[in-house]
Image (cartoon, rainbow, N blue to C red):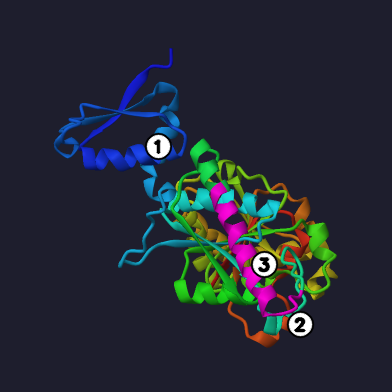
């Protein structure tokens, strides 16, 4: 028999909202030791549920604020993780990754979606995962906002179901639907709220390369001053649980040390194998392979020595690789330091992170330095 067991003992005023929450999620609840004549004075009210419902009930009670809509912003500074979504399948994969990271960091997740307002829709053509039809009038824009909010609610409900089932870790989250060009909205929201990280789903490399304009993710990682974690649509959603091999693209300067330290702080308890990679210049590519290797040894040896001394829990090596080989590497994650660059440089000379994004189907963290 599926017997009733005691989940918790509370006073009646505290037991009643827990009972309401559990029942709203399909859990049968009984309250024992309640004085029906004066229930508010009843001491030690037992909240009893069926034994088979215990795992679900614990997830619900331990994360009450996620399920009862009581998430409130406090006066103190929160640790945030920004998750732009467009409600496609890869948004769910990126969400699973984001919730795993948020759970580890103790961060709140902000789900962000944007639509283009009618007055600017005629002037923009988007690519990658963000596609929009041009609204005919203000009423159409209002309808798009309403539709977007409905889709966001359904997406949030899906996430709650996944938290209830244990498919994704529990993390507090809330949502925003804003008007504006997606990459501009994401960058501005990042400036205003300073998230610890941005997690973005991307298309596969073959689909990215077919785009004429570029990708929203590429624009964000080139412009943002917080780490950006890009998750390809065919990436392993359990990556973080088995993360081991990382390719770290660098040139051996002091800024690489800052990025390596940030990477170490992201995964302090993970025994990583990090390969320091230098991409040869066009001139060097014409040279024999052994000359390229000698140049790499000369430039990366000081950095390699520093890393081995200061991060003994990480196994470091160094090599040279061409960008064409990025997608062939046996690696779990790519990490790229991103230096601040002006608009002219971003438009006419895309960053290394931007180039790798379009060539690789491997998850990538871009760390601003």
Q: Main secondary structure of the magenta part?
A: helix
Measure the alpha-carbon separation of dots 3 and 1.
Answer: 39 Å
In the rendered view, does 82 fall on the left or right side of 15? right
Q: Residues within 10 Å of mark 3 (few under 14, many from 20)?
A: many
Which residue is disc 3 drawn over? 217
In the rendered view, does 277 fall on the left or right side of 82? right
Q: Residue 112 placed where, x, y %?
A: 56, 65
Measure the alpha-carbon separation of dots 3 and 2.
Answer: 22 Å
Return the mark for residue 22.
1
The magenta region covers 134-157
In the rendered view, does 33 fall on the left or right side of 50? left
Magenta segment includes 142: yes
Callout 3 secondary element: helix
Q: Indicate the quadrant where residue 244 lies.
A: top right
Callout 2 secondary element: loop
**In this rendering, does residue 294 appear at all?**
yes
| For the residues bearing labels 3 and 1, Cβ distance under 8 angstroms | no
Which residue is disc 2 drawn over? 122
Q: Residue 213 placed where, x, y %?
A: 79, 74
Which corner quadrant holds the N terminus?
top left
Residue at left offset 44%, top offset 27%: 53
Identify which residue, 174 or 235, lies in the foreground: 174
């Amino acid at each position: 028999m599926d017997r009733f067991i005691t989940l918790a003992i509370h006073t009646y005023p505290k037991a009643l909202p827990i009972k309401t929450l559990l029942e709203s999620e399909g859990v049968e609840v009984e309250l024992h030791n309640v004085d029906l004549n004066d229930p508010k004075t009843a001491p030690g009210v037992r909240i009893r549920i069926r034994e088979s419902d215990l795992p679900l009930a614990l997830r619900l009670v331990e994360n009450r604020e996620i399920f009862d809509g009581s998430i409130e912003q406090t006066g103190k500074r929160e640790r945030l993780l920004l998750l732009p979504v467009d409600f496609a399948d890869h948004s769910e994969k990126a969400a699973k990754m984001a919730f795993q990271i948020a759970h580890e960091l103790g961060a709140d997740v902000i789900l962000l979606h944007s639509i283009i307002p009618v007055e600017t829709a005629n002037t923009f053509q988007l690519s990658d995962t963000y596609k929009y039809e041009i609204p005919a009038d203000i009423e159409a824009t209002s309808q798009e906002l309403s539709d977007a909010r409905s889709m966001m609610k359904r997406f949030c409900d899906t996430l709650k179901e996944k938290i209830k089932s244990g498919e994704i870790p529990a993390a507090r989250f809330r949502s925003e639907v804003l008007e504006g060009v997606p990459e501009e909205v994401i960058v501005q929201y990042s400036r205003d709220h300073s998230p610890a990280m941005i997690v973005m789903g991307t298309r596969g490399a073959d689909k990215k390369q077919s785009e004429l304009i570029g990708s929203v993710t590429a624009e964000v990682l080139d412009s943002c001053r917080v780490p950006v974690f890009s998750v390809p649509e065919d990436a392993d959603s359990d990556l973080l649980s088995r993360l081991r091999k990382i390719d770290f693209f660098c040139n051996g300067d002091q800024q690489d040390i800052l990025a390596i330290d940030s990477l170490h702080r992201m995964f302090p308890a993970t025994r990583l194998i990090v390969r320091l990679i230098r991409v040869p210049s066009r001139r060097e590519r014409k040279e024999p392979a052994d000359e390229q290797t000698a140049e790499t040894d000369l430039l990366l040896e000081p950095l390699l020595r520093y890393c081995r001394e200061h991060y003994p829990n990480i196994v470091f090596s160094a090599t040279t690789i061409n960008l064409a080989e990025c997608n062939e590497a046996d690696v779990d994650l790519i990490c790229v330091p991103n230096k601040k660059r002006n608009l002219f440089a971003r438009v006419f000379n895309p960053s290394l992170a931007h180039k790798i994004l379009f060539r690789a189907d491997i998850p990538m963290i871009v760390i601003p330095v």
